[in-house]
Amino acid sequence: MTVDSQTQLQADGVYFFLSHGHDAGDSALDRDYWVSAVFHDLVREIDKRPRAQLGWRIGEVRSCSTAQREDAVRRALERARVFVALYSKGYLSDEQALAERDAFTAAAKEAAEPRILPVVWEPARDGGAAELAQAASMAPTIAQYVESGLLALSRRKQTEEVYRQVLAFLGEWIVAVADGRPPPAVVVRPPDAAAGRELIAAAVQRHEAARRQHQRVRPFAPRIRILDADECDADE
């Protein structure tokens, strides 16, 4: 890679790339809907936070076939600073998702900090124990998240508070690592409700203090990009 191309990648950076994989029998329409919903919620979470690179896109995610979007995904992986993997049994048997992870790992091999953020999307009782254990260890150790996964939390109104708490941690991790700072420490499960409220209040205070310190004007709208079929068709 030339110096000019490296400079261009730096200018066109993306905070995170969202990678997802599924069982062959899953409904494509249903899985894409929930992946897209969580993706946009995570983008909004990051957009609220002070960031060093306001000109970068916040996130990219694929949603079209392999043949259509191979070059577009390759470019997105080259520019992404963090790779968010939605781990499930389906992900760990999805050749396309694993190829994305391997491509990002190869591109980011010289990074000082690990830049792959594993997420418990759907717990797998009969496979993927090592990867899912790693995902659980990197996010807040909240019982509902570890036992049910982020997909289930996103679907249930009664778990919305827990869902938002996990998103806040993921957003903080992505921004810190992408901006070249150490990732936040793992949050330990609070022993009771009062401790949980104190934990959330402390996170809010840190966020507001960081916002006042930066005193930057946010872009008018989140800079996101979904690699959809229409765009891929246009690139051909």
Image (cartoon, rainbow, N blue to C red):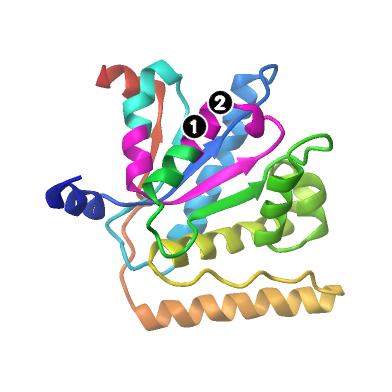
Figure quadrant of the N terminus? top left
Front one among 119 and 50:
119
Picture coordinates of residue 158 (x, y %)?
80, 51
The span from disc 2 to disc 1 (Cα, nearest Å) is 6 Å
Note whether 50 is above or below 205 in the view shown: above
Residue at the (53%, 47%) spot, across then down: 84
- Is there a contact, CB below 8 Å, between mark 2 and mark 1? yes
Say if the magenta span includes residue 89. yes
The quarter of the picture where residue 81 lies is: bottom left
Q: Is residue 195 above or below residue 95?
A: below
Q: Which residues are magenta?
A: 74-101
**Label 2 belongs to which residue?**
95
Magenta span includes 194: no
Q: Is residue 153 visible?
A: no
Report the residue marked by disc 1.
Answer: 99
Give x and y (percent) for residue 41: 55, 49
Circle 1 Cα neighbour tier, 10 Å, few/some/many (<14 / 14–19 / ≥20)? few
Kind of residue indicated by mark 2? Glu
Res 167 seen here:
yes
For badge 1, the amino acid type reads Ala
SS assignment at label 1:
helix
Residue occupying the far left of the picture? 4
Which numbered dot is residue 146? none
